[in-house]
Image: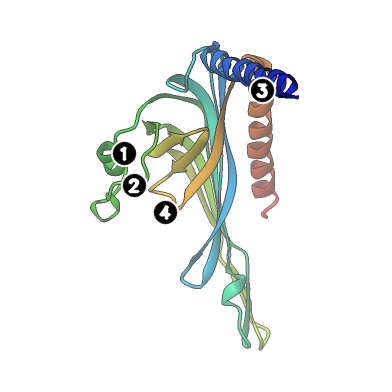
Amino acid sequence: MEKVQAVVFLLFVLIFTVIQGACSSSEERDCNWLLRVEETIPVMEDGLTIEYTLVLIAYKMGGKDVYGSYEGAAYIGSRMNASGLSGIFAKITDGFDTDIYANNLSFELEPFDREEYARYGSSERHSLPPLADYDSMALLSPVMKGHTNHNPFIEIIDGFAGGYFDSGGGDAFVAMKIAVNSGKVYVEIPSICNESFEGTITGSPKINEKKYQDEIKKLEELMEKAVEERAKGR
């Protein structure tokens, strides 16, 4: 009986050693890296809900860790429906929508610096260092193309109705802060909203250029859809 127990114990040790070795060698393999964020966050502001959306895709070819140069694309959208202001005497619909994007992002993931991260792109009252420590960060201000529609419409109970429409577009620098910790990605866009968008970063030899381009295609389709909806007045 003791011999059987000894054999079982030795097998357990052997299996554990093999697993540990596989994990270690996996971590040391050369990988390709895909950073992906896709999240919509509703934010209540002055009684109205504004939905902020971020889609960020970035890719790094090669490397044994997350550090290094990435290229990618990003889309930022915001939607506000003024129907929340409707009351007994008036019905209000629509509001505003904004779409901005950049398809030539490039940034460097480097060791995290709390003070530098806190200051970047933030006003003094929002420049407190983050409470958490992260592994790495990227600070960037890409030129993003954008378009905004303002189209609130009001209908009063006595039959009066009226609306307002305005639109504009152009290019602007948009500060973005990316923090990475244990495979998790956190993105702040101080000039857009005070929320943090979350995503993931994955490293694997199986991640290739085609997978990255497939993700970029999804992002481009999202931007095209936003343009089409604006053209329809939605």
Label 1 or label 2, whichever lies nearer to me, is 2
- Gap between marks 2 and 3 measured at Cα: 47 Å
Task: Tell me the kind of residue under disc 2.
Answer: Pro
In the displayed structure image, the side of residue 122 where residue 74 appears, left or right: right
Residue 203 vertical placement versus 156 (above, below)? above
In the displayed structure image, the side of residue 180 where residue 203 appears, left or right: right
Q: Mark 4 points at which residue?
A: 194
Where disc 3 sits, the SS reads: helix
- Gap between marks 1 and 4 measured at Cα: 14 Å
Label 1 or label 4, whichever lies nearer to me, is 1
Quadrant for residue 114, please give it. top left
Where disc 2 sits, the SS reads: loop
User: Which residue is at a point 30% across and 43% down the rendered structure image?
Assistant: 118
Which of the numbered marks, if any, corresponds to residue 9?
Answer: 3
Where disc 4 sits, the SS reads: loop
Q: Mark 2 points at which residue?
A: 130
**Percent position of residue 27, x then y:** 53, 18
- Gap between marks 1 and 3 measured at Cα: 50 Å
According to the image, what is the colour scheme of the structure? Answer: rainbow
Q: In what quadrant of the picture does the C terminus appear?
A: bottom right
Task: Tell me the kind of residue under disc 1.
Answer: Tyr
Quadrant for residue 121, please give it. top left
